[in-house]
């Protein structure tokens, strides 16, 4: 019984608090945007390091650190060709089409090393006309793949038919 | 409402009626039909409307469910005619003039809309322009045509979108309501600015996160035997099955809901990864990898559950999966698909982890490792939770039996959980109504997934989403949003009668009480002395993490990591193998291609390794690219589950101060295998764990840092009488090798430069390919190996999730010995996540850089021709 009374009292209190909270919520919608950090698009001077092109740091990197942060590599238009080569090496003869859609360029700390990178959406078509799309982060100089993400989620009608590889029978000949 | 059916007009025309008669008959028939719009039968749906007084604008006839439900369980998947199954009433498809849908989400009283957030198309190779509305302003097309399926796909995707955004709106409000009490929440207040409640963070054409800023649905895409969601598009794709002509996945709306739910999971995971329309994290979080893993299983379970949210049925894909390959999945223990005695909706009869991880209810005698089967544990738990909330919270008296309210609560829990786990900004908390920008001692402080730069690595590899991590966070959110009741606080949870004990018992019924505390004390990722309240004054959280009541742990058994080891041949088990090697070129090329089409492009080294060197001798030879499948062994008396092995870089090396110019590190003593006598170091930086993830690479002056992470593989250097384990960088300069950078694995050059700043000289000779350097295993039975538990049962074949890909430099002298120090752990581990010296508080994220949370597994091998 005591618990119920408590509940009633607390419910009234919470309603009042919620109403108050809602009152304060509304006008803050626009003020919040003012409070937020503006996007930090930093155009680096090209003479900071040989061959350095314009870069952009992610917004969370403290401004104070940006000037001290020089990318090690030098962007090159060859990244695209090199990336294609890598994809062809992996895809072999089954690869029919490659489409690379660069969506962003920026400086990224790759395992502690600041690098100019390209964010690229890769679309591949194989010899069965199946299309797959995913994203890669590549070194803007060498085209080397640094990360993959946003891979497709496949739902086969029969999971038992999913790709599997048989162990060599020599392991368990018995 | 006036509608004239073409079937009727055709008859009139056939009888040679004059045009005048026809014109006279139109309003008359229209008037008749307007008296009772339900007169429109499914057969009528096959006709075109020839007069529309605007009440049919944007409408069409759609099938509301699958043929299995509408035509009965005997309806087969060949030559499907959906025209006979459309509903009598026309439904609004879209108010737009082409087949696109709009998104709207309420933020309290603010309505934020994204016009044309969904585009419905037929296939990837077809037009990219959505079908326009008919001249009569309807979307009625002939049944079974591509346009008909595009209309139906848009209808169901729009229904799913509206349900999702309505429930996310509820979740958003509930989450913000805890803020005045100083409590942390995950769904960000600034979500309305970032628009990350949909796939639209960036509007600028030169800085985008996706191919398009809308979701594209391909209702008849060229994907054999599959339906899929692709986050990079973003796209939903519904294929067909060649052996069933006329069958398409899109004919089963539960599959549409399932695929949409993958899109929903992708959105929820990334809710925190942008603060406004131009400030965002360049990467995105995902759940699932290239084979079996627990994140992928949870994703599948949530997707099945969303189908239940939409259609209230406790079975998924009765038609699309059930009638094609007998693969329909139950969503509750109550379903008759479960044929094993004892499975029932009782405490002892639940579909518990890890017992049912490999369970296919349609073939219960066969064990198959697959995310869809393992996900059933999640879907069953979610449905059971929904049912429990209905009666515990008094929702059953609602008109819908409490379905909407109960599922909204579950969606709140999912939204909070996923947005926290996928947080790549790594803050884990906001500054009340704005993104956290506070610093401690001038440094950024992070509370989740280590830090901004390494958060992707942490939440996908070092501390990934597993059954343990997911349900620990989910349970924390139940305590916060549902069960919360404290007499000294004015705040009350949504349903205090579903208290912490009841929540823990239900989780335990499913074997999911895999954690000792809720890890809710808000410690930072690098220091236990920094917490939420240090960064955000006034924020409240427990000083010590809230513990699980051990009385509630009855089925969730935890096992020490010391009982996990690499399998070894013994007299009793002479056929046991430690590592399986795949080195035949055909299989390896197939594996690499399969990885690529699953979206895992790996940076294969050119010139110094390749499948052309593979010699199929199931040994490791120079130049090969091989798959390595560790065969782990469980020495405990209970089943180990969610076993993960990592070959990623970690802090296991010490660089003496006199070696900073050479980078010749010494391995740390982390076990009894690599000793001081063998060149290892027990002191120095080996006594601490590096709090950041930085590699031991030289700076521009050629000086190596004193601390950092190192690749897993070392090499044995034999000098005279002594042998010691050294870095590959040291070895390649000695032993008469003198290998240059360009002759190392992972070295890339262009015509313009021979510098590669992403190159790591410590992995010059052998390396696990980035992106394919971890493996996952569903479970290992008591006193058995993984092979004996799973592989043997499945005919000796492994899935890609079990394999890691290794490259071997062709210049390695035969006979060279390597030791790769991998780290392993599992989800029901008693000492892989918590630190006994800190009151069973979870390890802080930085500690996942070292060996403490893991069992070190040494992979020793010789390279030989």
Image: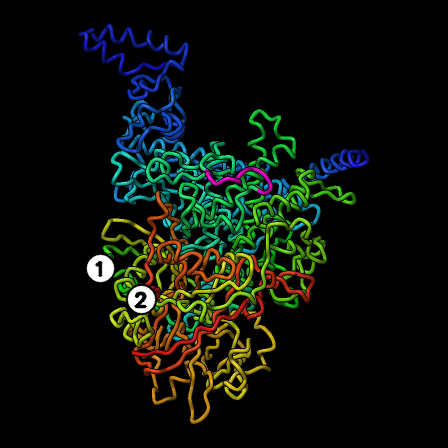
B829 vs A155: above or below = below
Which residue occupies 66% across, 42% down?
B502
> Which residue does the numbered mark 1 point to in the structure image?
A93
Q: Name the chain letter of the residue that bears numbered label 2.
A: A
| Alpha carbon distance from label 2 to label 1 | 29 Å
Q: Give the numbered dot on residue A170.
A: 2
Give the camera-side residue of B62 and B365. Answer: B365
Q: How is the image coloured?
A: rainbow
- Magenta stretch mostly in which secondary structure? loop
Q: Quadrant of residue B481?
A: top right
How many numbered markers are drawn?
2
User: Residue B372: horizontal and vertical position, in percent?
Assistant: 43, 46
- State the residue lying farthest toward the bottom: B720
Q: Name the chain letter of the residue that bears numbered label 1.
A: A
Numbered disc 1: secondary structure = helix
Query: Residue B81, can we see it?
Result: yes
Q: Quadrant of residue B509?
A: top right
Give the camera-side residue of B712 and B168. Answer: B712
User: Residue B160: horizontal and vertical position, in percent?
Assistant: 45, 36
Which stretch is magenta? B338-348
Which residue occupies 49% across, 60% down?
B643
Q: Residues within 10 Å of mark 2 (few under 14, many from 20)?
A: few
User: Residue B537: horizontal and vertical position, in percent?
Assistant: 70, 56
Give the camera-side residue of B108 and B457. Answer: B457
Looking at the rendered image, the quarter that the N terminus of chain B falls into is top left
């Amino acid at each position: 019984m005591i618990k119920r009374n408590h509940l009633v009292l607390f419910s009234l209190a919470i309603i009042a608090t919620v109403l108050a909270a809602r009152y304060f919520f509304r006008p803050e919608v626009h003020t919040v945007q003012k409070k937020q950090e503006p996007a930090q698009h930093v155009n680096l001077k090209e003479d900071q390091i040989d061959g350095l092109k314009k870069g952009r740091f992610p917004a969370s990197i403290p401004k104070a650190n940006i000037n001290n942060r020089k990318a090690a590599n030098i962007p090159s238009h060859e990244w695209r060709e090199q990336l294609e080569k890598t994809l062809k090496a992996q895809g072999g003869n089954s690869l029919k089409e490659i489409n690379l859609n660069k969506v962003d360029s920026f400086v990224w700390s790759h395992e502690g090393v600041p690098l100019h990178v390209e964010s690229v959406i890769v679309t591949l078509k194989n010899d069965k006309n199946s299309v797959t799309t995913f994203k890669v982060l590549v070194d803007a100089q060498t085209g080397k793949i640094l990360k993959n993400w946003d891979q497709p989620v496949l739902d086969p009608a029969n999971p038992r038919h999913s790709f599997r590889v048989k162990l060599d029978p020599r392991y368990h000949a018995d | 409402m006036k509608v004239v059916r073409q079937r009727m007009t055709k008859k009139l025309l056939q009888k040679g009626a004059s045009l005048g008669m026809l014109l006279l008959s139109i309003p008359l028939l229209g008037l008749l039909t307007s008296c009772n719009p339900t007169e429109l039968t499914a057969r009528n749906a096959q006709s075109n409307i020839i007069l529309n007084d605007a009440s049919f604008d944007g409408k069409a006839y759609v099938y509301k469910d699958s043929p299995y439900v509408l035509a009965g369980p005997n309806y087969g998947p060949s030559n499907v005619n959906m025209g006979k199954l459309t509903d009598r009433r026309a439904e609004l498809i879209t108010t737009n003039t082409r087949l696109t849908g709009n998104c709207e989400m309420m933020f309290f009283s603010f309505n934020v809309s994204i016009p044309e957030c969904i585009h419905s198309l037929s296939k990837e190779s077809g037009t990219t322009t959505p079908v326009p509305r008919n001249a009569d302003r309807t979307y009625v097309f002939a049944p079974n045509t591509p346009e008909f399926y595009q209309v139906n796909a848009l209808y169901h995707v729009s229904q799913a979108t509206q349900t999702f955004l309505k429930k996310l709106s509820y979740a958003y409000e509930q989450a913000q309501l805890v803020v005045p009490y100083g409590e942390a929440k995950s769904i960000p207040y600034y979500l309305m600015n970032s628009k990350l409640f949909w796939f639209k963070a960036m509007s600028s054409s030169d800085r985008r996160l996706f191919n398009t800023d809308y979701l594209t649905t391909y209702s008849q895409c060229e994907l054999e035997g599959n339906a899929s969601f692709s986050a990079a598009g973003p796209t939903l794709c519904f294929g067909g099955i060649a052996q069933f002509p006329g069958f398409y996945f899109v004919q089963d709306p539960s599959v549409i809901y399932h695929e949409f739910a993958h899109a929903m999971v992708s959105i929820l995971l990334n809710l925190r990864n942008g603060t406004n329309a131009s400030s965002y994290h360049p990467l995105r979080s995902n759940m699932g990898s290239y084979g079996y893993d627990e994140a992928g299983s949870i994703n599948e379970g949530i997707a099945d559950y969303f189908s239940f949210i939409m259609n209230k049925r406790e079975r998924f894909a009765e038609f699309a999966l059930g009638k094609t390959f007998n693969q329909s999945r139950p969503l509750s223990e109550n379903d008759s698909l479960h044929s094993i005695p004892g499975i029932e909706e009782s405490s002892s009869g639940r579909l518990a982890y890890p017992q049912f991880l490999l369970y296919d209810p349609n073939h219960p005698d066969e064990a198959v490792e697959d995310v869809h089967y393992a996900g059933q544990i999640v879907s069953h738990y979610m449905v059971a939770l929904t049912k429990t909330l209905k009666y515990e919270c008094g929702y059953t008296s609602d008109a819908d039996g409490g379905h909407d309210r109960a599922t909204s609560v579950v969606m709140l829990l999912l939204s909070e959980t996923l947005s926290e786990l996928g947080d790549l900004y790594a803050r884990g908390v906001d500054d009340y109504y704005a993104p956290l920008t506070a610093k401690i001692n001038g440094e950024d402080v992070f509370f989740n997934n280590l830090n901004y730069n390494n958060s992707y690595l942490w939440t996908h590899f070092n501390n990934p989403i597993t059954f343990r991590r997911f349900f620990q966070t989910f349970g924390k959110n139940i305590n916060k949003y549902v069960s919360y009741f404290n007499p000294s606080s004015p705040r009350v949870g949504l349903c205090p009668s579903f208290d912490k004990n009841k929540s823990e018992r239900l989780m335990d019924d499913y074997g999911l009480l895999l954690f000792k505390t809720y890890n809710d004390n808000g410690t930072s990722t690098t220091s236990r002395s920094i917490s939420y309240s240090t960064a955000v004054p006034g924020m409240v959280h427990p000083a010590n993490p809230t513990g699980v009541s051990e009385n509630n742990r009855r089925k969730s058994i935890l096992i020490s990591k010391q009982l996990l080891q690499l399998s070894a041949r013994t007299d009793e088990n002479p056929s046991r193998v430690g590592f399986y090697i795949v080195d035949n070129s055909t299989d390896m090329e197939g594996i690499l291609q399969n990885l690529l089409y699953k979206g895992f492009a790996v940076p294969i080294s050119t010139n110094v390794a390749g499948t052309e060197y593979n010699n199929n001798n199931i040994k490791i030879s120079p130049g090969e690219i091989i798959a390595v499948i560790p065969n782990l062994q469980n020495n405990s008396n209970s089943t180990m589950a969610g076993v993960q092995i990592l070959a990623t870089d970690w802090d296991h090396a010490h660089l003496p101060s006199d070696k900073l110019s050479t980078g010749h590190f010494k391995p740390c003593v982390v076990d009894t295998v690599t000793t001081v006598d063998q060149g290892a170091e027990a002191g120095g930086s080996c006594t601490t764990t590096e709090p950041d993830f930085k590699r031991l690479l030289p700076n521009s002056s050629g000086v190596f840092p004193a601390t950092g992470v190192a690749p897993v593989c070392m090499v044995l250097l034999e000098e005279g009488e002594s042998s010691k384990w050294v870095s590959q960088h040291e070895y390649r300069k000695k032993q008469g090798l003198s290998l240059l950078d360009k002759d190392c694995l992972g070295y890339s050059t262009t015509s313009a430069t021979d510098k590669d700043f992403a190159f790591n000289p410590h992995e010059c000779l052998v390396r696990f390919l980035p992106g394919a350097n971890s493996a996952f295993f569903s479970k290992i039975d008591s006193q058995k190996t993984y092979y004996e538990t799973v592989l043997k049962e499945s005919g000796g074949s492994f899935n890609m999730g079990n394999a890691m890909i290794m490259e071997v430099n062709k210049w390695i002298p035969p006979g060279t010995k390597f030791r790769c120090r991998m780290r392993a752990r599992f989800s029901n581990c008693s000492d892989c996540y918590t630190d006994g010296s800190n009151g069973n508080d979870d390890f802080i994220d930085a500690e996942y850089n070292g060996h403490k949370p893991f069992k070190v597994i040494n992979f020793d091998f010789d390279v030989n021709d």
